[in-house]
């Protein structure tokens, strides 16, 4: 077998080292070939479109979407293992008119691309990635003939590891496409921003067709020749953000894939990129090119919280066409990936969090609800203001760092964040955290060990160091708050994800002027415990809860045994796991303020179902509890 690579080029090696994948992928470059295998060649004749990357005269990459004029397959052939022949009729406005002029064959421009599954853009995603050069470009009547020489390929079974976050959609030919240019700016001035319509188009997409360029240094040309690369970045609509500060930098997280990091590696060496966003509902397409940068670790988290790797592309040119693509998605067959990570917004979009320098939280009481769930009460050294649904971050370094803790790395992070489940309408020196114990959680094991000592012992039995848990408060904040003007709410929770809604319901119960109509869709294995926590504020308030209505759709294998349910609460029990169709039964769902707090799998299913129901992604407030430990 011939290898398409002699190793990882300097940019790939650098980013693999940064992310500690070097050993895992040390020999994976041998997966690349310098030819198209027979089974891949036959697939090209069946595809409905072919995304490719080319360079404009200034060395900027652009991603084009090649199709037949009618959207039907059959416009690509492969006469041998190193050749692809493509017959197309590029629509006016396609970047190919700048990057690839017919009958100008004096140069051999680079090309990179990828097929997708035949007739279906699927979760199996990019297949048969290739790079090479364009040997010939001819104009035959109104059509172009492009002849690609393929010099590097990555087999489908490996490239599809990146595709689990992709939306599944069935496509069909649309012969009546009529391209119209709406926006075009090939050279943005330093102070220019993207038009608001294009910002909305970007932030509503679930997929970016992503092109990168590796320009080899002279010393590396022989072993690592220059090439173009294509990939797809996918997620929940809204996963791609546009920075408010300049109105033109597109940022998006890099989710785990095959760990080869080819696109990021190209950017490390050659900081340019291209993004094309197709809309298969309307046929609209947005082409973007610009400068690019990778952000890793703390630098990424300064832009977007809890993201390890982030790509930022500052747009320098764009083209937007209406009704250009001769393909349409089949209605009712589009499915969002259930494993997509939750939507993350930029730090500059988040409410300002509060920081604390010399305020401490002292553990004063614990109420265990089960062996792995407890309510921990803290007293602060000075009053703090916490909104309902806010989180608080505590520093356990002083009580754990340097202590005899088995299996703990020296660089362990001792900061932990939980939702505050108590509510106070003014500054207070008390707050409660509802915490679930995790077997692998350093901090939760420590807290539950303290709780066991507090419960089993009398004051005379306990040593002062056992009781004295004093933790610096690092910060508090959050956007899981009651909306200022809406009283019709939809809350979706899974397991311990109920915690922010306990705090919000505490707040609602304390309000007597506005009647709230709340629908809670809740999946749990411990219904009695969680419902008792939710209903707790009703015990101390006799009249206010009557003004509010709470409907609970409970999904649990266990039947709740609660006998006293307040008359303003309707509890509907569904035995088993969450059923997405239940959201379609929620009255006036499009007019409700929607919040979701659940594990990633459930959260992805819920958000996908909400999007299918026509809910805009920016209308869904979403959180997982990966940091509740």
Image: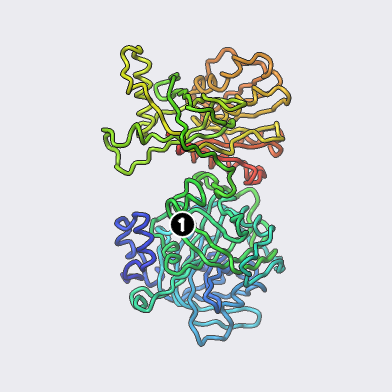
Residue sitting at the far bottom: 106
Picture layout, residue 54 above or below residue 532: below
Q: Is residue 231 above or below residue 413?
A: below
Camera-side residue of 98 and 124: 98
Relative to 427, 356 lies left or right:
left
Crowd tier of the residue under label 1, counting other residues whose Cα lies within 10 Å: few below 14, some 14–19, many 20 or above: many
Residue depicted at 34% across the width and 24% down the height = 449
Judged from the image, the secondary structure of the residue bearing numbered disc 1 is strand
> From the viewer's perspective, is 185 left or right of 265?
right
Q: Quadrant of residue 160?
A: bottom left
Asked where in the image residue 318 lies, by quadrant, the reply is bottom right
Residue drawn at the location 46% of the way across and 34% of the way down:
358
Does residue 430 show up? yes
Q: Which residue is mark 1?
A: 295
Pick the quarter of the image with the N terminus.
bottom left
Residue 65 appears in the figure: no
Quadrant assignment for the C terminus: top left
**Residue 95 image offset from top left, x and y in percent:** 60, 73
Residue 584: horizontal and vertical position, in percent? 65, 36
């Amino acid at each position: 077998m011939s290898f398409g690579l002699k190793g990882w080029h300097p940019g790939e090696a650098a980013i693999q080292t940064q992310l500690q994948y070097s050993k895992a992928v040390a020999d994976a470059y041998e997966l690349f070939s310098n030819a198209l295998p027979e089974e891949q060649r036959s697939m090209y004749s069946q595809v409905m479109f072919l995304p490719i990357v080319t360079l404009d005269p200034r060395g900027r990459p652009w991603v084009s979407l090649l199709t037949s004029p009618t959207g039907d397959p059959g416009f690509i052939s492969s006469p041998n293992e190193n050749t692809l022949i493509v017959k197309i009729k590029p629509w006016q406005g396609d970047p190919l008119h700048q990057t690839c002029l017919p009958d100008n064959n004096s140069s051999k421009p680079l090309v990179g691309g990828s097929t997708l599954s035949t007739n279906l853009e699927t979760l199996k995603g990019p297949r048969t990635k290739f790079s090479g050069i364009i040997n010939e470009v001819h104009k035959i009547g109104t059509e172009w003939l492009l002849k690609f020489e393929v010099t590097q390929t990555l087999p489908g079974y490996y490239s599809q590891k990146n595709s689990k976050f992709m939306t599944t959609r069935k496509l069909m030919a649309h012969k009546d496409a009529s391209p119209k240019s709406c926006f075009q700016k090939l050279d943005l001035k330093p102070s220019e921003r993207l038009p608001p319509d294009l910002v909305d188009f970007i932030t509503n997409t679930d997929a970016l067709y992503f092109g990168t360029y590796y320009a080899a240094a002279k010393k590396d040309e022989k072993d690592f020749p220059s090439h173009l690369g294509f990939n797809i970045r996918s997620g929940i609509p809204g996963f791609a953000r546009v920075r408010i500060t300049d109105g033109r930098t597109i940022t998006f997280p890099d989710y785990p894939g095959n760990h080869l990091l080819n696109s990021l590696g190209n950017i490390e060496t050659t900081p340019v990129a291209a993004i094309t966003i197709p809309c298969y509902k309307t046929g609209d397409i947005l082409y973007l090119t610009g400068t690019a940068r990778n952000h890793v670790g703390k630098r990424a988290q300064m832009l977007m919280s809890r993201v390890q790797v982030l790509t930022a592309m500052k747009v320098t040119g764009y083209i937007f066409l209406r009704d250009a693509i001769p393909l349409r998605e089949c209605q009712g067959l589009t499915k969002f990936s259930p494993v997509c990570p939750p939507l993350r917004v930029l730090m500059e979009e988040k409410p300002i969090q509060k920081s604390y320098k010399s305020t401490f939280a002292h553990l004063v009481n614990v109420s265990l609800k089960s062996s792995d769930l407890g309510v921990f009460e803290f007293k602060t050294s000075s009053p703090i203001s916490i909104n309902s649904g806010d989180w608080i971050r505590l520093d356990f370094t002083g009580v754990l760092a340097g202590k005899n803790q088995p299996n703990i790395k020296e660089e362990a992070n001792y900061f932990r964040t939980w939702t505050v489940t108590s509510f106070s309408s003014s500054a207070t020196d008390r707050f409660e955290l509802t915490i679930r114990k995790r077997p692998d959680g350093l901090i939760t094991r420590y807290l539950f060990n303290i709780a066991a000592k507090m419960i089993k012992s009398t004051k005379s039995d306990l040593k002062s160091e056992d009781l004295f848990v004093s933790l610096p408060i690092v910060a508090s904040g959050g956007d899981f708050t009651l909306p200022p003007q809406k009283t019709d709410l939809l809350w979706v929770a899974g397991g311990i994800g109920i915690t922010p809604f306990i705090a919000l319901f505490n707040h609602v119960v304390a309000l007597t002027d506005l009647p709230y109509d709340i629908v809670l869709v809740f999946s749990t294995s411990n219904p009695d415990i969680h419902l008792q926590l939710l209903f707790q504020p009703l015990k101390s308030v006799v009249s206010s809860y009557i003004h509010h209505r709470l409907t609970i759709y409970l999904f649990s294998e266990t039947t709740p045994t609660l006998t006293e349910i307040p008359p303003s609460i309707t509890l509907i029990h569904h035995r088993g796991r969450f059923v997405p169709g239940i959201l379609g039964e929620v009255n006036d769902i499009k007019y409700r303020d929607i919040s979701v707090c659940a594990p990633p799998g459930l959260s992805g299913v819920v958000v996908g179902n909400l999007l299918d129901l026509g809910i805009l992604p920016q209308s869904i407030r979403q959180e997982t509890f990966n940091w509740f430990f």
